[in-house]
Amino acid sequence: MMKQYFFISLAIFQFSCTSQQKLNNSIEPQPNKMAWIEEIVHPSIVWKRHHFKNIFNAKQYINVLDIDLNDTLIKVDIGFQKPTLLTTHEIAEREKAVVAINGNFFHTEEGGSVCFFKKDENIIDSSRTDLTERLFLTWLDDAAIAFTRERRVIIVNEPIEGWLGIDSLPTIFTGGPSLIQNGTEVKQAVHSFNNNRYSRTGAGLTNDGHLILVVVDGNSTESAGMSIKEFAQLFKSLKCTIAFNLDGGGSSTMWIKGQPDNGVVNHPTDNKKFDHYGERKVANALLIKLK
């Protein structure tokens, strides 16, 4: 059991950080004041990024992918391979994706997600209810990106009967905590995972059918990272009416096909450097493909 204790990779304890900054008095970012650098990856995929000097009283390096799901050529998918762990860019290249972010919380020794994951009616991984709270917090499994039978992309919260109780959605890919519901920030539990600043990865949806994928770098003098509350405020500023958190820390990675540095555009922290080469091997990735 002690060996298992040290090998669960949940961004709770394995963030490759040099410091963990507590939440300061924060001011919600204003999108009209954000000087995003924008690049068209595809007519329906916009990549926005900027190294901000002062958001939430700190430097923040933020990457955003804005995907227009109204384009019928866009396909959202989940790439995985059990029990092998691969970097996000390896999964994305193998699956012939256009853009990708890292996925949900996983087990570094056994492989696979420790959150609920069902794809095309097949249960790939179940929630690891055998883990103690120090290894897995219940709210890391309380929301999901899901696909309907018509392949419509939605974000849903866990029902009372649990994820196994949903038969109508063939694909469910969970994470947590939930950040935004019905346009309102979700009240968070008081816990170091939520309160401290880390690298973060998350996904949200807007009312007009755009999928917003965000990676915030952390654990660096160049980018502090965000608390869960700050991360939720960022999604709200990006006009998301629903959003949830995915694995973060050293796992946080955004990949774009054709970009230098293996396509990695953020600064993963597993090598403890502010560069593009500190990718962590992960269990799965959220992918955007073209049909």
Image (spheres, grey):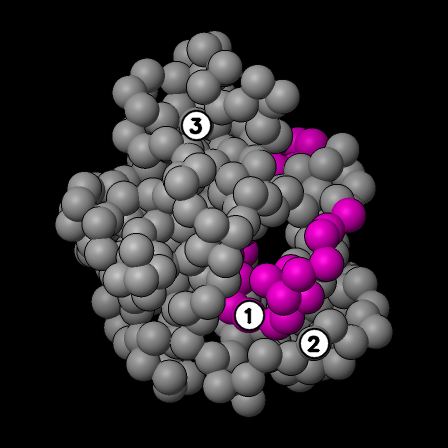
Q: Is residue 113 magenta?
A: no
SS category of the residue bearing label 2:
loop
Residue at point 72%, 58% (across, down):
190
Disc 2 marks which amino acid? Lys
Q: Which residue is mark 2?
A: 22
Q: Is residue 247 visible?
A: no
Density class for disc 2 (Cα within 10 Å; few <14, some 14-19, many ≥20) is some
Task: Read off the residue under disc 3.
Answer: 172
Magenta residues? 187-214
Q: The disc labelled 3 sits on which kind of residue?
A: Ile
Q: Secondary structure at mark 3?
A: strand
Task: Give the residue number, with chain letter if any, for mark 1.
Answer: 198
Q: Disc 3 versus disc 2: distance between alpha carbons?
A: 32 Å
**Residue 71 or residue 5, whichever sits in front:** 5
Task: Single out the mark in the foreground, 2 or 1.
Answer: 2
Q: Are marks 3 and 2 in contact (CB under 8 Å)?
A: no
